[in-house]
Image (cartoon, grey):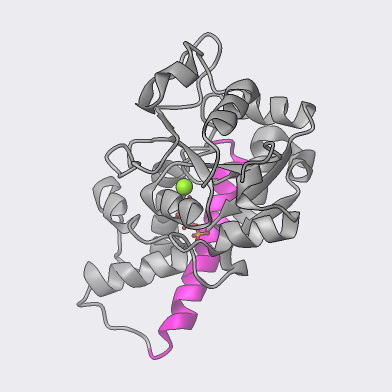
Amino acid sequence: MNETLQALLFDVDGTLADTERDGHRVAFNLAFAQAGLDWNWSVDLYGKLLAVTGGKERMKYYLDHFNTGFTRPADLDSFIAELHKSKTAHYTALLAEGRIPLRPGVERLLREARNAGMRMGIATTTTPANVQALLTHTLGEDSQSWFEVIAAGDVVPAKKPAADIYTWAMEKMGLTADACIAFEDSENGIKSSVAAGLRTIITVNDYTREHDFSDAILVLDNMGEPDQAFNVMQGDKTIVNGAACLDLELVQRLANSLPSA
Ligand code: XBP
Ligand code: MG
C-alpha cells in the first residue's frame, strides 16, 4: 500500500556531511596518538575499515584484520571503549572548529522540508554527541529540534547494515516505511534502510562511489543547488525531469511514482 509521504529519514555520516575522511578518521588518529599507540589510519586504509559501521566495532575489525600482531590488553572492550570516548572528544572538537561543512543542498532541503511541515528523523550508527555537534555547528543550536527523533549509536545493538536503527526511528515516530523516504550514502546504509522497507535516495561520496546502489530509487553525486546542478548517476531521468537539485517537490514526485512494495 502507498501512503502520502510523511517523513524524511536522514543518515548523517557521508550524507549530511563528508565526515569520514577529515573528521572521524582524523579523530581516531588523534585518540590513538594520545593513548601512545602507533596506529595510524591512512585515507586508503580507512576506506577499507568503513566496511564496518560504528567506531568501536571498526577498531575491533582493524585489530582482527589489519593489526593482528598487537598485544591485546586483558579487557579489550574497556580499552576500546576508552579509546572511543577520546575519539568522540576529538571529533566533536573538530566539528566545533567548523572544519566540516554540510554537503551541497543539505541545508536547503532541510530548511524547505521544515518550513513545509514535513516530519524529519535521523537514523545513524554514529554516537549521539557527534550528531549534536554536527547540527549545532552547521545549522545552529536549535536545529536538533528540527528532527522528531534522533536514532543514533548504541540505541540498537545491531548497527547498519541491520534494519534496526531505521525500524527503531519509525516506531518512535509512529510511522510505517511506506510513509517515509530515507537518505543514505553507503552500501551498509542502503542495506539497512531497504531491509527496513524504505525507499532510498543516495548521494555518493568519494568512499562510496563504487558501492552497489541497485536498490536505490535515485543515485546522485550530491543534492545539488539551483545554481549548481546535481548529476543523476542512476534512476529514472523522466521523473527527475531536468531538475537541478533535490527539493521537496522532487522527493514527493519520486515517492508518488515509486510506491513502496
Ligand atoms: C557511520 C559510521 C560511524 C562513524 C563513526 O555509518 O560508520 O561509525 O564512522 O562513528 P552510517 P562512532 O553513516 O552508515 O551511519 O565512532 O561515533 O561510532
Ligand atoms: Mg553514511
Q: Is residue 146 left or right of residue 177?
A: right
Principal secondary structure, stretch drawn in magenta: helix
- Rendering coords of residue 26 (x, y %): 41, 50
- Residue in the foreground of this view, choosing between 225 and 60: 225
The residue positioned 69% from the left and 34% from the top of the image is 139
Decide if residue 127 is in sight here: no
Q: Residue furthest left?
A: 69
> Residue 180 occupies which quadrant of the picture?
top right
Q: Which residue lies furthest to the bottom in this view?
A: 74
- Residue in the foreground of this view, choosing between 59 and 249: 249
- Rendering coords of residue 259 (x, y %): 55, 38
Q: Residue furthest front?
A: 1
> Residue 213 occupies which quadrant of the picture?
top left
Indicate yes or no whether the magenta region holds residue 172: no
Q: In this view, does 45 lie above or below 81?
A: above
Indicate yes or no whether the magenta region holds residue 96: yes
Decide if residue 83 is in sight here: yes
Q: Is residue 131 left or right of residue 63?
A: right
Q: Is residue 15 above or below residue 187?
A: above
| Magenta residues (range) | 74-99
- Rendering coords of residue 38 (x, y %): 29, 65
The residue positioned 51% from the left and 26% from the top of the image is 223
The residue positioned 47% from the left and 51% from the top of the image is 194
Q: Is residue 228 left or right of residue 46?
A: right
